[in-house]
Image (cartoon, grey):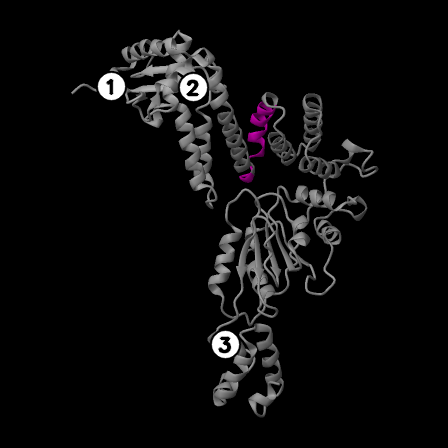
């Protein structure tokens, strides 16, 4: 039985065709167009009409479709007749997607999507590196088919850019800041209008301690956008620039005079309230929240713990926070948002409190909410801080307070679900079960006393509705009145 030849077609860069590992020279431009069109649909039939359109473009005619058979015959002589099958109305290149670099690239990106979000990003990073290594230059660089390039090349370039950005994000997440600077510098030179690439280069330079260089790169990008498109950088980039200018004021004397150019000193602060001794139940919920705080993602995990007043939201968040201290060695911050007070804290004041915790001098605070928010994100960009935002009123109150990079994490407590908070994970806190309620009450009242008047104790537990706050109030009253009827003492 005759062995099938091994075919490889490379289109991510200069055209290359190999058969059994040996390069095949394809001089004719239309022969390359035909081969590329078939390779892009490897394993699937392509009509003669479509092949003629891609190969001859606007010059396609009945005569060109007749000439197509000649090119097909020549290609069969090179790769073997069995590899190029005649179908009902056209032809099919009978090879797997692994034999065509464009299709292999697409398959690898699908694999990246499947593993994205895993706690360990190693596999995702390896797949991205393999996918990007397939590129040797612009896609379809020497394929003389304007129509084929217009239909295929732009989407491939966009997929490549997104893969570069995703790999840069993962490298930055893993602390490999210096490793991505060179690559991003080269890519921004080639594609100076892609703002998201510039943003990652600016962040990478800042995290390498090269904030002045990062600000210089911003100016370079702004000039390119102004010259080529007549526009300014987007709002997110302007905020990033303002926050970096705060950290490197000598670079921007007019905006922050007399500050001296020192980086803000970092002090580790644990501000969490004390953990409570009578925390009962919810072991599975505590472990679930701990896993979510460590989940790998493009941004910081944000957990919203919602529930009824008195159900124990703050106690749950505090317990989780204390258990996660070693995972967030740069600090565990606590801010009361006073959402249920009728006078919730404003984002401007809350940001001032957070920036003070981060060590930012009060006389160097930006005046706007957006400026303070950007400064906070910059200060937390290379840190691992857990922030507990207690008693939130709304998503609008919380949104400006969030860090912008993975490594940090946020727990929010609220009486309502914050449905407008993008990327947040909700956790509804249920009331305690009857068994758990009895256990909590037993922390305050002797179990023998409760058992001696079982009907009364169960009535009190039922009246508390599984709310820890109510149970503690009743337990405190019973403990203060050690004698007498349970029902009467608990009132």
> Does the segment drawn in magenta span residue 176?
yes
Q: Is residue 293 placed above or below 182 in the rendered structure?
A: below
Residue behind mark 3: 439
269 or 74, which is in the foreground?
74
- The crowding category of the residue bearing disc 2, from other C-alpha atoms within 10 Å (few below 14, some 14 to 19, many at least 20), is many
Task: Report the side of 132 relative to 490 (left or right).
Answer: left
Q: Mark 3 or mark 1, which is nearer the start of the sequence?
A: 1
Mark 2 vs mark 3, CA separation in Å: 68 Å
Q: Residue at x 58, y 80 (%)?
A: 475
Question: What x and y, as percent, mark residue 214?
Answer: 68, 31
Q: Is residue 349 placed above or below 66 in the rendered structure?
A: below
- The crowding category of the residue bearing disc 1, from other C-alpha atoms within 10 Å (few below 14, some 14 to 19, many at least 20), is few
Residue behind mark 2: 11
Q: Quadrant of the C terminus?
A: bottom right
Q: Residue at x 37, y 8 (%)?
A: 63
Question: What x and y, as percent, mark residue 201?
Answer: 62, 31
The residues colored magenta run 173-188
- The crowding category of the residue bearing disc 3, from other C-alpha atoms within 10 Å (few below 14, some 14 to 19, many at least 20), is some
- Look at the numbered disc 1 and give the secondary structure of its residue: helix
Tell me, yes or no, whether the two marked residues, 2 and 3, touch with CB atoms within 8 Å: no
Q: Quadrant of the N terminus?
A: top left
Residue behind mark 1: 82
């Amino acid at each position: 039985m005759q062995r099938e030849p091994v075919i490889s077609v490379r289109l991510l860069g200069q055209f290359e065709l190999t058969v059994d590992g040996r390069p095949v020279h394809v001089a004719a431009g239309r022969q390359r167009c035909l081969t590329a069109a078939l390779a892009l649909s490897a394993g699937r039939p392509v009509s003669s009409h479509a092949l003629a359109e891609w190969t001859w473009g606007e010059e396609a005619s009945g005569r060109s479709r007749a000439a197509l058979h000649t090119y097909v015959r020549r290609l069969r002589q090179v790769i073997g007749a069995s590899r190029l099958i005649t179908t009902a109305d056209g032809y099919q290149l009978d090879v797997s997607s692994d034999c065509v670099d464009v299709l292999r690239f697409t398959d690898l990106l699908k694999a990246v999507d499947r593993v994205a979000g895993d706690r360990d990003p190693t596999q995702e990073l390896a797949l991205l590196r393999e996918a990007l290594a397939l590129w040797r230059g612009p896609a379809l660089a020497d394929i003389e088919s304007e129509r084929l390039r217009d239909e295929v090349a732009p989407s491939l370039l966009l997929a490549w850019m997104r893969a570069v950005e995703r790999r840069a994000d993962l490298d930055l997440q893993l602390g490999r800041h210096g490793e991505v600077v060179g690559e991003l510098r080269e890519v921004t030179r080639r594609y100076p209008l892609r703002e998201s690439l510039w943003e990652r280069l600016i962040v990478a330079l800042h995290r390498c301690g090269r904030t002045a260089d990062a600000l210089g790169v911003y100016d370079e990008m702004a000039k390119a956008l102004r010259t080529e498109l007549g526009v300014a950088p987007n709002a997110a980039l302007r905020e990033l620039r303002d926050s970096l200018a705060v950290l490197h004021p000598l670079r921007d004397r007019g905006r922050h005079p007399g500050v001296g150019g020192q980086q803000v000193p970092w002090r580790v602060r644990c501000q969490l309230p004390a953990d409570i001794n009578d925390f009962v139940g919810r072991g599975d919920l505590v472990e679930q929240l701990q896993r979510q705080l460590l989940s790998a993602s493009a941004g910081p995990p944000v957990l919203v713990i919602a529930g009824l007043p008195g159900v124990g939201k703050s106690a749950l968040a505090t317990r989780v926070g204390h258990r996660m201290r070693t995972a967030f060695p740069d600090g565990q911050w606590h801010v009361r948002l006073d959402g249920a007070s009728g006078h919730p804290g404003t984002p401007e004041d809350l940001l001032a409190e957070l920036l003070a915790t981060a060590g930012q001098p009060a006389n160097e605070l930006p005046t706007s909410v957006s400026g303070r928010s950007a400064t906070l994100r910059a200060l937390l960009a290379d840190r691992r801080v857990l922030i507990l935002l207690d008693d939130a009123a709304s998503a609008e109150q919380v949104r400006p307070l969030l860090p912008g990079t993975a490594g940090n994490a946020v727990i929010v407590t609220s009486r309502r679900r914050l449905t407008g908070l993008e990327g947040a994970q909700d956790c509804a806190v249920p009331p305690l079960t009857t068994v758990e309620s009895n256990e909590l009450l037993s922390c305050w009242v002797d179990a023998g006393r409760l058992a001696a008047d079982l009907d009364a104790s169960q009535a009190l537990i039922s009246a508390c509705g599984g709310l820890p706050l109510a149970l503690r109030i009743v337990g405190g009253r019973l403990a203060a009145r050690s004698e007498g009827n349970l029902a009467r003492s608990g009132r």
